[in-house]
Image: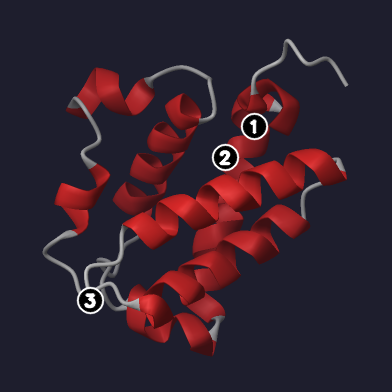
């Protein structure tokens, strides 16, 4: 593993990230455990998919697509209108963990991503 590569590059770049995001939302759409967080999203997930893809691109060290289009992510502020409790966090993480698990990632990268995503998801809680 080349330690000079960004997590974005180690993940597989744009195509792998798009695959991750699409699978994440497919799982959110189908898991009964994710019903409540799915209800917080619009019926058409196209915009949600695009925004998460753009955000994760920059967050992982790739192109700063979200910032270029929308400015600073202000994640917590953007999520304040929604009730996000431990159950919502856990449902979000369940979908992300399963989606990441379906990618062919080395164990260390997967663990690093899960830890960082867990911290970020926990920071979004407002209940």
Task: Residue under label 1, please give it.
Answer: 15
Q: Looking at the rendered structure, which numbered label has been put on residue 127?
A: 3
Q: Which tag is nearer the camera, tag 2 or tag 3?
A: 3
Q: How far apart are marks 1 and 2 (CA)?
A: 5 Å
| Residue 105 left/right relative to 54 | right
Q: Distance between the residues labelled 2 and 3?
A: 30 Å
Per the image, label 3 sits on a secondary structure element best described as loop
Badge number at residue 64: none
Residue that carries the numbered disc 2 in the rendered image: 18
Foreground pick, 100 / 27:
100
How many neighbours does mark 1 have within 10 angstroms: few (below 14), some (14-19), or many (20 or more)? few
Between marks 1 and 3 in the image, the one whose residue lies nearer the viewer: 3
Q: How many marks?
A: 3
Which of the two discs, 1 and 3, labels the residue nearer the N terminus? Answer: 1
| Residue that appears at 85% across and 46% down | 107
Answer above or below: position of 74 versus 22: above
| Vertical position of residue 19 compared to residue 12: above or below | below
């Amino acid at each position: 593993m080349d330690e000079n590569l960004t997590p974005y590059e180690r993940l597989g770049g744009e195509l792998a990230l798009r695959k991750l995001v699409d699978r994440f939302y497919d799982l959110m759409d189908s898991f009964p455990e994710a019903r409540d967080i799915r209800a917080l999203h619009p019926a058409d997930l196209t915009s949600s998919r695009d925004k998460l893809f753009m955000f994760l691109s920059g967050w992982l060290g790739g192109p700063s697509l979200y910032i270029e289009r929308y400015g600073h992510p202000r994640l917590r502020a953007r999520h304040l209108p929604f009730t996000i409790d431990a159950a919502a966090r856990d449902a979000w993480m369940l979908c992300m963990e399963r989606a990441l698990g379906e990618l062919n990632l080395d164990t260390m990268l997967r663990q690093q991503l899960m830890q960082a995503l867990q911290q970020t998801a926990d920071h979004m809680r407002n209940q």
